[in-house]
Image (cartoon, rainbow, N blue to C red):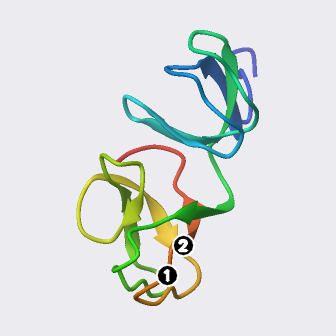
Amino acid sequence: MKNYVQKGENITVPAPVATLSGDPVLIGSLFGIAAGDALEGEPLDLVTTGVFILPKVSTDAVEIGDELFLNDAGLVTTTAGTRIGVAVKPAANPSGEAEVRLNGFVA
């Protein structure tokens, strides 16, 4: 196909802020996990698919299949924020992490 660009599993974008490998990154409607470190404006590879362990609101109980969101503090939550994916493993209240299957974009 002459109009094909790439698979899209990894997207290279300018880092919106100084970013560390493993950080969640939201740019408009694009969400991914930083594959490496980058200073603001430097090229940053975002992984947009897959399952990642991310910090969550400790008081949220998560069940497999729950929709998960990123809040303004950069934590995964079940209640509100930007939709980023679904839970693939239960996480109790209290606990500080959730296993999230990314949806690759914000819906």
Q: Which mark is residue 98?
A: 2
Count of numbered marks: 2
Residue 76 spot, x, y in % from top left = 42, 62
Please name whichever residue, 6 or 82, is drawn nearer the observer in this view of the structure: 82
Q: Is residue 70 above or below residue 44?
A: below
Q: Residue at x 71, y 35 (%)?
A: 10
Q: Which mark is residue 2?
A: none
Residue 11 figure quarter: top right
Residue 98 spot, x, y in % from top left = 54, 73
- Crowding at dot 1, Cα within 10 Å, few <14 / some 14-19 / many 20+, comes out as some
- Residues at discs 2 and 1 in contact (Cβ within 8 Å): yes
Tell me the kind of residue under disc 2.
Ala
Relative to residue 48, is residue 26 drawn left or right?
A: left
Q: Residue at x 30, y 46 (%)?
A: 72
Give the residue at the far top of this rendering: 41
Please name whichever residue, 58 or 62, is drawn nearer the observer in this view of the structure: 58
Closer mark to the observer between disc 2 and disc 1 = 1
> Which quadrant of the rendered structure holds the N terminus?
top right
Relative to residue 37, is residue 102 drawn left or right?
A: left
| C-alpha gap between disc 2 and disc 1 | 8 Å
Residue 23 figure quarter: top right
Tell me the kind of residue under disc 1.
Ser
Q: Is residue 74 above or below residue 94?
A: above
- Crowding at dot 2, Cα within 10 Å, few <14 / some 14-19 / many 20+, comes out as many
Which residue is denoted by mark 1 in the rendering?
Answer: 95
Residue 19 spot, x, y in % from top left = 61, 29
Residue 21 figure quarter: top right
Q: Residue at x 37, y 28 (%)?
A: 28
Please name whichever residue, 100 or 9, is drawn nearer the observer in this view of the structure: 100
Helix or strand or loop: what does disc 1 sit on? loop
